[in-house]
Amino acid sequence: MLDKGTKEEVFLRVKRVVRAEPNQRLDIKDLSEVVSEDKLKEEIEKIRVKEVVKEAGDSMIITALEIIGAIKREFPELRIEHIGEADVIIDIEKNSKKNKHQSSPPRLYVIFVSLILFLGSAMAIMNFHADVGMGPVHQRIYQMIMGVSNQEPLLLQVPYSLGIAIGMIIFFNRFYKYKIDDDPTPLEIEMYLYENKVNEFSLAQKSKRAKQIKKGKH
């Protein structure tokens, strides 16, 4: 056991989002990354901060001050440098065992959704081409190159259609299970931004509720 009055300096990087189960004990190691001397780090990581309660609902907030306070109770003289987020959002996963078995959607459902997306995309592209008059443009280009008129210039339309498909694959950086390169796809970026917005909203709602409860007690 380390000396409680140690003058060691500790760097604490608080996490943004942590997933936990109801009644789970949350230690320092679950909520943040600790940089310090090895023995001190082990002692700090074992410190209990809070327990996930059922009353919290789907999420709860643990502030960086709560984490630092828990460490200070065990090591009062410790110098703590806080880096990272001001609050940790705890996503409470209920029935986690059941969710693991249902994590992959049924194949029929995937086929149905893919078919709807395919038909919707096809209709959107065809309507766009009808609005801008792409058909007459292809006919005109074919006449300029070949010297004859053709109402269905497949020599242009087929490569053009394939080009659209190849362009979409390159843009989304994914074909079936394979990625063209290591760059994030537009969908991954949108999901990242969406998750950040959800976390910010959840944090704001929890903070607002905590203030209302505090006012009600007074």
Image: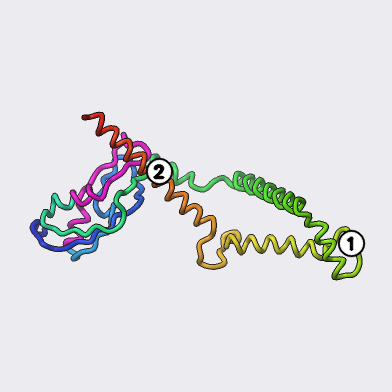
Q: Which residue is mark 1?
A: 150
Residue type at numbered disc 2: Phe
Q: Which residue is mark 2?
A: 201
Q: Which is nearer the N-term, disc 2 or disc 1? A: 1
Q: Judging from the image, what secondary structure is the residue with disc 2 in? A: helix
Residue 175: image x %, image y %? Answer: 60, 61
**Stretch of the chain drawn in magenta:** 40-69
Residue type at numbered disc 1: Asn
Q: Residue furthest front?
A: 132
Residue 138: image x %, image y %? Answer: 81, 61
Q: Quadrant of the C terminus?
A: top left
Which is more toward the observer, 83 or 143? 143
Which is more toward the observer, 166 or 44? 166
Structural distance between the alpha carbons of marks 2 and 1: 57 Å
Does 202 sit left or right of 49 as displayed?
A: right
Q: Bin the neighbour count of mark 1 within 10 Å (Cα to Cα): few under 14, some 14-19, many 20 and up.
A: few
The label on residue 176 is none
Residue 51: image x %, image y %? Answer: 26, 42
Whether 3 is among the magenta residues is no
Question: Could you tell me which residue is drawn at 26 percent across and 45 percent down?
Answer: 25
